Image (cartoon, rainbow, N blue to C red):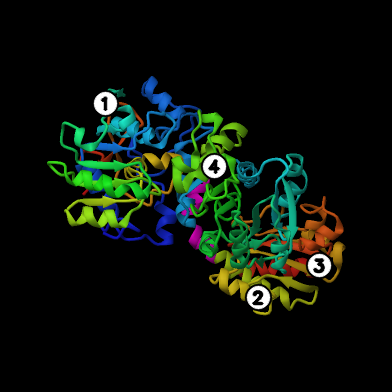
Amino acid sequence: MNHDSYPDTYIRGILNTVKTVAMVGFSPNTTRPSYFVFKYLLERGFKVIPINPGQAGKEFLGQTCYAALNDVPEPIDMVDIFRASEHVMPIVEDALKLQPKPQVIWTQLTVRNDEAAAVAEAAGLKVVMNRCPKIEYGRLSSEISWMGINSRTLSNKRAQNLGGGFQRMGLGEAGGKKND
Amino acid sequence: MADAERIPGFDTLAIHAGAKPDPTTGARATPIYQTASYVFDDVDHAASLFGLQAFGNIYTRIGNPTCAVLEERVAALEGGTAGLAVASGHAAQVLVMQALLMPGDEFIASRKLYGGSINQFNHAFKSFGWNVVWADPDDISSFERAVTPKTKAIFVESIANPGGTVTDLEPIGAIARKAGVPFIVDNTLATPYLCKPIDFGADIVVHSLTKFLGGHGNSIGGIIIDAGTFNWSRDKKYPMLCEPRPEYAGIVLHETFGNFAFAIACRVLGLRDLGPALSPFNAFLISTGIETLPLRMQRHCDNALAVADFLSTHPNVAWVSYGGLAGDKYHGLAKKYVPKGCGAVMTVGLKGGYDAGVKLVSNVKLFSHLANIGDTKSLIIHPASTTHRQLSDEQKTKAGAGPDVVRLSIGIEDKADIIADLDQGLRA
């Protein structure tokens, strides 16, 4: 995968497939980017498991926080990393020891470690780096367009309303067709 | 689109960017969401919106779905990451500078600007403690010499109003990069159809949407485009972007919103607190205008070049300033930055001086005598007695608006009719 530019089909495929996301480097501070993403992905129907050794055992928005990936008692589809680039490799190594293995390693804006990405890809995982899943979900669902952001998408189909409110959009088209 | 990875062309973006079918009704034209406010799904949703944790609509002073279509469309046409539409081009400049400057700071601006901007920078902005330092676009080194530790931005127009002169964007952008400040380009006269300043180093693009983008002289509006290129956190010079914001319980906008943080800052700090929101109805008219921008803009340019050619040999005309003319001082820059045409605005020096200017605006029958540019209609004004009246004679001449100067904005009527009207007006 070319990590400078991801096709929308690749990102959309990942967000349509993964259900359980472990968030390494989660902050309980409600104004930090990790908390924004945590809350947003929960609201969009993902199961999000916070990982932070200093907060282990506590609950945030009903989700139990764990100290490390291998403490999580259920399968993880995607590991979302909110740590600086130099800390990514050990997290990927931990992720690859999980049974079953996760399908995706995702690192947040400004976080990129090509060596760790190569290790994960060699083990059959998909990798996304220097992106935010909240921004990508918002972009591909058209929600982000409400903020004047260039979604870099055109469509002749209505966006899908997720229900449960007016301002929650999904990644498919109206009528239930799942894109890609 | 069938091929999801195909990059759409400019003309396609002008029609489709930002405007998917309405999610609620399926309306294919962009609906006019003429509402002040939006119902929250529940208390938690409201809290998420106010805390910037969710994307969505709260109140039309901060965002509106019709305005958002316009914002995304112009952002796409300029190749930027995000847009913020506001009540006027002047309002766009206020919000940009308010996000960048603290009282006592400086910004460098080209001397060759729209007279209204010269007034805004010299007077209103100085009363906020935002100090303009003027530089000469014909002497690029004057920008470099103007840089001080207080400099927070460099501001130019791509094609400068009123003289149809073209600014050498690349070297000025390089000076901004070296100084570690954003390069702001007002792209009103060129529009992204003729020039995309981001390709030449702009970090922020602003427009008066009232002109060629809207195109029909029916709505006032402005827009800020974030190129997503500037690193707001590097030198810690821009507290609105790189420091915890007390307005939002300590959120740091750059780390939270990445490469569209500037547009978000202008929205959630500037627009929210200063208030120059665009009417959704104006946004609808301007977005509709943009659908035909490529067709109109080419016709504007073709007509303008024909008019400039005609006037340059007219017995009552001393000179024509239009970068599209082969012999013009700015023709080389025009070929580089605006190869499809040099826009529709030019200035003409009349042999009869101030009185001849006043006479011409009175004699024309097709041209409208008014203070605007970028209408489908041909427009004329004598800057020395109107738009540039408040400037000193020296400032007028430096801005390309001396007493003998008439400014034309060439419309998209039949060019033979435009030329005939000017000829009879000059000879009458």
Callout 3 secondary element: loop
Q: Which mark is residue B241?
A: 4
Drawn side of residue A164 relative to residue B332, left or right: left
- Cα distance in 3D space between marks 4 and 2: 43 Å
Drawn side of residue B302 relative to residue B128, left or right: left
Q: Is residue B285 magenta?
A: yes
Question: Which residue is label 3 attached to?
Answer: B428
Same chain shared by disc 2 and disc 3: yes
Quarter that holds the C terminus of chain B: bottom right
How far across and down, in percent of the image, does residue B175 sit?
63, 63
- Cα distance in 3D space between marks 2 and 3: 26 Å
- Residue drawn at x 67%, y 66% is B164
Q: Amino acid at mark 4?
A: Leu
Q: Amino acid at mark 2?
A: Leu
Say which of B238 and B172 sits in front: B238
Given contact means CB atoms under 8 Å apart, are the residues at marks 1 and 4 in contact? no
Q: Which mark is residue B325?
A: 2
User: Would residue A146 be seen by someone viewing this image from the given angle?
Assistant: yes
Displayed quadrant of residue B21: top left
Q: Amino acid at mark 1?
A: Gln
- Cα distance in 3D space between marks 4 and 3: 58 Å
Q: Amino acid at mark 3?
A: Ala
Highlighted magenta segment, given as a residue range: B284-298
